Each structure stands twice: as structure tokens, then as C-alpha cells.
């Protein structure tokens, strides 16, 4: 990006008769500091010149340049905008619009910078630097618009992914709830079966080993007695003749 770094040394509509020696001295000192890259010191000198003559076109224009070099683009843009609104020489006005475009471009105000460059070219159509900066500003504007569209697309995709993730989480939570419910039901059934078993065990009489053996012996004795009685019925007693006589 090109920038008019030259300091204005002579302008057509400056009324030198109205100037005192003091503002000229400050401007010369500011120009020297500017040339040496001491932009803050140059700013101080230009402001001193404006204190002596607030209408000094040289001091205003060069102050804008020193602020621009410091990266204070909003401040420099305000100065160039103010100069562009004045009735000044056509060539100086074209430079003011050019530098205004540069300040706006640095501030990433691409649409406004394009408008400023166009105004400069209306005054000076053959200025190559302004044409270059205009095309650069247009390129940056297109990139900004494309980036905004991409950001919107990325945000939409992110929203969809978040929505899908939320749905998956909800489904997962539902599955976990159902699983927990089944586990709780299974535990309840197991607990119920355990309680039934305990209750049954409590109801069943408990006997000692000795009592069980005695019961078994009694059952065996009863069986022997029954078998003995049955044999008595089946075997005839004595020599009794059970035949009937005719």
C-alpha cells in the first residue's frame, strides 16, 4: 500500500503574510523530526505550530502524517477528513483524500477507504498510487466478505453439530435412565425373592440332628412292625382244616 510520506513544503492557497515566524519554525523542526523517523517529536512540533496558527494547512496535514506513522489511524483520519471539507488546492485535496483512504484502510474500514480513494481519483485521475491502493482496498473488502460468509457457515455447522450432540446426549441419558430403571427393578425382584426365601426358611421348623435320627429310627420300627403284622396274616396258624364239608 502506497502512502504520501512527503511533507508539504509549499501550498498554493497559503497566505504567508498572515504567518508569524513562530509557526514556520515549529513546522520546520517537525519536518526534520519526521524525516528522521521521530514521529512523536514531529507531532509535538506540529501541535506547537497549530497553537500559533490553528488554520495552518501545513501543520494540520503534516500532523495527520505523523499520527498515521504512529499507527493512530482514527486520529489521522479525522484530520484528513477535516482538511477534505475545506476549500483548499485541488492537488492538496487529492492527497488529503488519498491519505484519508489509507487511514481508513489501516482501520479495516474498507468500504469507506474505497470511497476516499475514488474521491481522490476524481481530482487526480492519473495517480498510480491511488489506483493501486483502491484495488488493494477492494481486494481486502472481498476477503472480509468471504471471511464473514465462511464464519457464518462455520457457525451454522457448529450449531448443527451442537444440536446433534445434545440430541445424542439426551438419547444416551434416556438409555441410562431405562437401564437404571431395569437394574432397580431387577434389584427389587432379587430383594423380593430373598425376602420370600428368608420368610420360608423362618416358617419351616428346624430340628436337631439327634431328633432327626430318632424320627428316622421310629419310622423304621414302625415299618418293621407293619411287615410283621402282614406276615402273620399271610402264614396259616397250626393245622386248622379250612376245607368245608359237604
Image (cartoon, helix red, strand yellow):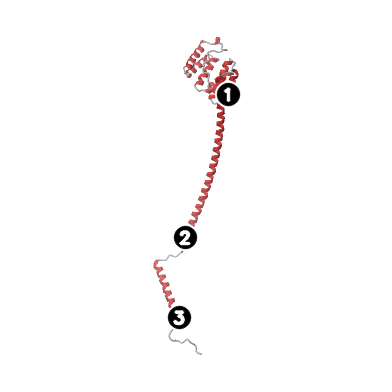
Q: Residue at x 56, y 35 (%)?
A: 153
Closer to the camera: disc 2 or disc 3?
3
Residue placed under numbered mark 1 in the picture = 114
Helix, strand, or loop for circle 3? helix
Marks 1 and 3, how far apart at CA: 135 Å
Residue 6 spot, x, y in % from top left: 52, 16
Helix, strand, or loop for circle 1? helix
Q: Residue at x 51, y 50 (%)?
A: 179
In the image shown, does 112 or 41 lie closer to the viewer? 112
Q: Is residue 114 above or below residue 229?
A: above
Closer to the camera: disc 1 or disc 2?
1
Mark 2, other Cα within 10 Å: few <14 / some 14–19 / many ≥20 = few
In the image shown, does 139 or 177 lie closer to the viewer? 139
Marks 2 and 3, how far apart at CA: 49 Å
Mark 1, other Cα within 10 Å: few <14 / some 14–19 / many ≥20 = many
Q: Are marks 1 and 2 in contact (CB under 8 Å)?
A: no
Marks 1 and 2, how far apart at CA: 91 Å
Residue 38 spot, x, y in % from top left: 47, 18
- Going from the N terminus, do you reach mark 1 or mark 2 first? 1
Residue placed under numbered mark 2 in the picture = 197
Residue placed under numbered mark 3 in the picture = 234
Q: Residue furthest bottom?
A: 246
Helix, strand, or loop for circle 2? helix
- Going from the N terminus, do you reach mark 2 or mark 3 first? 2
Q: Residue at x 54, y 17 (%)?
A: 61
Amino acid at each position: 500500500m502506497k502512502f504520501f510520506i512527503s511533507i508539504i513544503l509549499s501550498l498554493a492557497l497559503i497566505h504567508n503574510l498572515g504567518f508569524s515566524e513562530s509557526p514556520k519554525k515549529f513546522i520546520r523542526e517537525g519536518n526534520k523530526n519526521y524525516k528522521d523517523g521521530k514521529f512523536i517529536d514531529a507531532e509535538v512540533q506540529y501541535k506547537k505550530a497549530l497553537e500559533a496558527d490553528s488554520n495552518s494547512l501545513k501543520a494540520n496535514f503534516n500532523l495527520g502524517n505523523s499520527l498515521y506513522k504512529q499507527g493512530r489511524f482514527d486520529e489521522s483520519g479525522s484530520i484528513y477528513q477535516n482538511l477534505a471539507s475545506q476549500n483548499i488546492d485541488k492537488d492538496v485535496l487529492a492527497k488529503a483524500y488519498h491519505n484519508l483512504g489509507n487511514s481508513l484502510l489501516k482501520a479495516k474500514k474498507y468500504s469507506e477507504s474505497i470511497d476516499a480513494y475514488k474521491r481522490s481519483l476524481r481530482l487526480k485521475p492519473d495517480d498510480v498510487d491511488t489506483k493501486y491502493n483502491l484495488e488493494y482496498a477492494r481486494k481486502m473488502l472481498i476477503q472480509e466478505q468471504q471471511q464473514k460468509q465462511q464464519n457464518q457457515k462455520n457457525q451454522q455447522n457448529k450449531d448443527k453439530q451442537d444440536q446433534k450432540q445434545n440430541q445424542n446426549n439426551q438419547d444416551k441419558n434416556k438409555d441410562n435412565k431405562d437401564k437404571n430403571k431395569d437394574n432397580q427393578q431387577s434389584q427389587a425382584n432379587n430383594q423380593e425373592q430373598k425376602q420370600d426365601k428368608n420368610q420360608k426358611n423362618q416358617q419351616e421348623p428346624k430340628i436337631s440332628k439327634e431328633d432327626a435320627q430318632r424320627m428316622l429310627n421310629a419310622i423304621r420300627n414302625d415299618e418293621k412292625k407293619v411287615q410283621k403284622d402282614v406276615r402273620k396274616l399271610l402264614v396259616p396258624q397250626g393245622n386248622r382244616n379250612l376245607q368245608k364239608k359237604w
